[in-house]
Amino acid sequence: MRSGTENRSNSRAMNTPQILTRRNFFSTATGLAATAALSSLTDVPLFVQKALAEGGLGQPGTNGRVKKLLFIFLRGANDGLNNVIPHGDDAYGPKIRDNIAIPVDPAQSWNVQGKALFPEAGTNGATFAYPYSLPLGNGFAGLHPALKFLTPVYNAGELALIHRVAYPQQSRSHFDSQSYWETGAPRTNMVKDGLLYRAMVESGRPGKNSLTGVSFQNSLPLLLRGSRAAMTNLSDPTRYDLLGVPNTADGNLKTARALQAATGATFPDKANRDLLQQQYENMRRTLEIFAGIDFSEAGNTFVDNQNSDGNKPYSLFPTTNAKNGAGPSGATNPGYVVPTSAYGYFNQLKSAALVLNKTDALVAGTQIDGWDTHSNQGGATGAHANLLQRVGWSIYALRQYFRQYADQCRWDDLVIVTLSEFGRTTIENSDNGTDHAEASVMYVAGGGIKGLRTDATGKVTHSGVFNCGPSDPVAWQTGMTGSMFQSTGRYLQRATDFRSVMGKVVRDHLGASQEQLNRIIPGYADLKQSLKAGGIQSQDKVRVTGEPDLI
Amino acid sequence: MKLFYIGCILGMALGWVRMVAETPDILSLNWTNGRPSLEFRLLPSVSEYQVRASATLGMPGSPLAGKQLGTVWTAEAAATGDSGFYRLEALPLAAETVRASTLLNRIAYGPTPDALDRLATLGTDAYIEEQLAPEKISENLDESTETDPVWRKVTITGTGSSSKLYVYLNGAGDAYLDDFRLVAGTTDNGTTANLLINGDFEQPLATANWTTTTNTLNSARTTDYVHGGNASFHLVLNAAGSTGTDAVVQTIPTTLNASMPYTLSFWYLAQPSTRQLTVRLSGSGIVATVPLQGDAESPIPYYARLQEGSASIGDLRAWHVHHAVQSQRQLAEVFQQFLENHFVTEYSKGFTYFDDRAGLPNAWSGPESTRQEFKENLRWRRAFLNPQCTFHDLLKISVESPAMIIYLDTVLSRGDYDSTTKTNRIANENYARELCELFAFGVDNGYEQGDIEQISRAWTGWTVELLATNQAANPFATRTTTMITSGLTNATERNSVTNLLGLWSFRYRTDRHDPRIKWVFYERDAKGNILTNSPKTVPARFGPPWAGRPYGLKLSNGSTTNGIQDGYQIVRHMADQPFAQEYLSVKLCRLLVHDNFHHGYDFTDAETSPEESLVHDCMLAWENPTNGGPKGQMREVLRVLLKSDLFRNPNTAAAKVKTPLEFAASTLRAFRASKPDGSLTASADAPSLVASGGLLDRAGRMRLFDRAEPDGYAEDAGGWISAGTLSERLRYVQSLALAGAGLATGTGVRSSPDSLGSSRVDPSALLALRLTNGANRSAEAVTDYLLRLLFPSEGSANLSQYRALSIQFLNTTDNGTTPSEFANLVPGTKDYDTRVRGLAALLLSSPRFQEQ
């Protein structure tokens, strides 16, 4: 078994009394393994490493830092039409969404080109008191008010709002469609591993670096799954530790060593044995790394350096009532920035941010569940709005965290992407909800992302809204037969393939070569799919933009 | 130069009948001082790797002495002569042993020591038939077999640490106790002098040595219940007790000797209480702590609460898990969990519905949602006891269940005419889609979006309502009008659901139903218009007898109560279509064989894989049951599957990874053997396993009855195994090995064991039962027994490295390096127990124990 502790000294006198902590649960065993080793302990087969010269993926740039990615999967299908809202299309409104349409503020002018509105909580107003859509300054689209914390990022030009994102021959099954987003290979079951897993493989780092792709959720997402190398998933990093029997310094040592030997034993090949082997090995290597990061609640001291809303800087990762915006709302208190049910999620998001910032991991992420709003979806407030608050605050807070607390990863080094398997029907159903449909919204943010652009005078020259305006390359067609009703009458049809967005990020941000990208996203090599330059996608003859100009 | 004959494996055709030895792939051959050493690829389920030598090619030759460890076999002596032929053979483990292991891991929640022994004599075919007929297996887990009141006896031996005896509970409450005895020595034959005064409580407390404290002031002698004589002791505590100042105390007249053994016994009345009774000597030389409930593992109290509708979701989960661990009807339990997971519903969604929509108080919503989950569970359990239980029976239970009607939003879905929009309301598609995709046909298997829209209209009007108790099975009944308190003057209060007597049940509302004709499974033209003369036909890939069959369904039940038939006709129609046969067969194969089955096979293809063939065989058993009964009999399909060659194949053994539930149950069952006195060497605390922060929650958030996504919990390994979930599984078994053994938690360790509640394993006691005449003191015997118990399909030759490691583990001190002969440790001592528990934890922590 390969040692993950090259830097540790093996020369410590063997009879020195030791205090064994998690930090060295396994590494101590490794250091002393020679005395206990069975001759048969076999190494984990070396990972086939790609030639590093091929691309910059996973390689430090001239500033010595590596480009990284943080993903947030919105599972259950986000109703994109109530995220980035096409108010310029008369068909949007109570006619199709009697109970859940987001109204426009009669006091706001929609034709002004410029920056997006950020409605600050008033002296007596709650943070989310503003009940109207937020104009995005392109004369057409508005943002759901629960997403208000996106607007500072948007106005800084570091957020792209990409509407009408999907893939050809859309599946309306959650599970199939999530798989397609995660494998990056829609409508084929031949590709079994994840898009980001393949990106990690192309980086040549699995097998050399202990951490490559890391997720914080219940199980490792397909995005990071593959057969040749183990990515890491933890649900609660504060508990990531093992025990000895007896649970003493000696007992821990004996258990650790024996377990390491047992993990190294050879057995006949069986269906899941490679997976188990890789994940046991992965656990052995990563216990020590995670022990070096403070994931505790007490360590969650990250606070904004500016008043984003209300009258005081807020905690960046709301994991308790006290760390949630201004705290419980009161007469003069604007209240929470996210629902109190979001604390578990923000703990996961904080862990993902810490791992990107404190280790050499390239990719980290988590997910938000609960987007399958078939009934009682709500409008400016309600179930869907509560989920959107999480998204808005996540992107705002991550930007501040990587700007203020950067260690191995600065805001310029990071791109955040959101994924969601499909959008929802444009017309609401009898339960005041929406059913499964096609295209939805992707958010892409980062210090290097080109969203809204201004000239030297500060005048906005380029909107950060993609595919939600009449002048876009694949224009938004208004009216009751327009973009919102294509296909069979209640589906928003795609204008951009999600693979073009992911491809752009993987190549132009993470640094993959085009050759590598063709392997990471197989559709790229097929020109008929028009992923790079755009055009008609051959599978279902729909026109798409190709890669959006966002990096 | 020596020649080496390397045997080839032709096609790895490991049939279930492995009468002859096989020849593994040889990877390399080395010579050291004239001794040949072979490295080779291990084969599954091998008891011995043997090398035969012969002077002539083609002759069988004779076995050569050598030693195998892992993938390497080394000859004991240098080769004789200059040339010869050698052949490596793998002697397979008995096919019955492999199949028994696979059965106990797949149609049971893991082997128990007793079950392994039983199968060895019963035979695997007989076991399959026994388990396929659960109604013939007597089971009384939910039924009290004793008449009230039940007195239970506790006997415990310890040391005489003090002459003060304390009696208390761990909270406010009361208990009845009688006939205390404390005698010198390790046994009490009933005639030895009782060192306690008034242990039978025939005299009042205060006058005969029992003293109360402020906390126990209301304790008294009573004649309400009696074990022996005319009176007993009624112990009453105002708050939790823990020591002499808050307990009932007897100061024993005889001075006890702290280094001598004494045996305490007493009787207590079992009662439905969550309190624990403690009787102990000051200094804790003797401590007896027992749950007043009596048998802590009994599902009876949970069942009682579930029956009366007061149970929490935790009660339902605990009841379900107790059955999983204890039931003799193991296949029925595995199948029950399969159904719960296949026809998934979400407790939390029901809770929210009753709380927010139905107007129930918060405190009532949990029990009500639990009741709906329990009703489903119970109906499925009962359905499977019918020998001819069909898939349609099971699907219908799901369809009618209020839990499902609420879960996938049918409850509010409407399709009636809306006079404002001048069109029918748009039905919610959620249930229709998952019915096709997840519950009956499989994704994209025989349906399309247009069919979902048609089907969604059929379920409009299916709601949940509070019906009069005697109308609960009548879906056309209106809301109950029976009031609990009819004298209320406020009309709102009078008619509130909290003042109405009834049961929340399925109700069909004609006024919400879309009465228009539905054309389900019909072809469409290019514009999407339905071609009413063209029902869809079964695709050619299914082959005979299915291919080409039309399967369109026209529903024209209109607007009367007949409209309820729309839904029933759909499930009747779908249940036996080849798509359902294929999809459910695939899911059962994934559950019981291995992960790599999928729907969409071309059954007409000349090239068929064993997986495709097995699915096809299951479908034929579904279509043409041998007993002539209805199509879709689950037992017929299961029998084909369990008796298939693929199921018996050694590559199938241990090819799946346990879910958290299977892992939890199998750890406890592995050490759970019956002692001669009827007690067990392991016990399960089901409420702790399923609690928030328990193993099932931690190791991947397996919240039974409360899955948010309608695809159910993963059956494949990738859905459960990551570094984070593995560490939780390992912490659990390590904590389990530590629990209750008095093993010290040392200084300098970072983590404490997790709270397990009262789950316990006692591997030393198991070894004492199974390894007699001192064999439980042999490191080799202990190792071999545990390896056979925990990895019964692997074969001793494939376990050679685990064996060497285990023996070394037993023969070293806690630091793992200082030699310390296991044979020198005495069973019953803490040192012995620590060593054995350490090995048990190690083996349960190993990769192989994740498999089933």
Image (cartoon, helix red, strand yellow):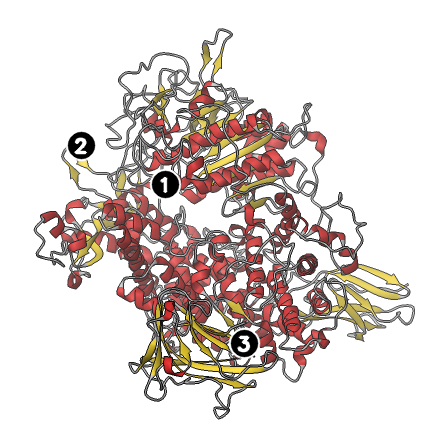
Label 1 is placed on what type of residue? Asp
Circle 1 or circle 3, nearest the eye: 3
**Relative height, residue A420 to residue B671 (above, below):** above
Q: Residue at horizontal 51%, vertical 86%?
A: B183
Label 2 is placed on what type of residue? Thr
Q: Position of residue B214 (x, y in %)?
A: 37, 68
Q: CA distance from mark 3 to mark 2?
A: 85 Å
Q: Chain of mark 2?
A: B
Q: Chain of mark 3?
A: B
State if disc 1 and disc 2 touch (CB < 8 Å).
no
- Kindly indicate whether the residues beneath marks 2 and 1 are on one polypeptide chain: no
How crowded pointer 2 is (Cα within 10 Å; few <14, some 14-19, many 20+) is rated as few
The label number, if any, that marks residue A372 in the structure image:
1
Q: CA distance from mark 1 to mark 3?
A: 64 Å
Q: Between residues A526 and B141, which one lies in front from this camera angle?
A: B141
Q: Position of residue B834 (x, y in %)?
A: 64, 69
Mark 2 residue element: loop
Mark 3 residue element: loop
In the picture, residue B792 is in which quadrant? bottom right
How crowded pointer 1 is (Cα within 10 Å; few <14, some 14-19, many 20+) is rated as many
**Relative height, residue B709 to residue B99 (above, below):** above
Give the labeled residue for mark 3.
B162
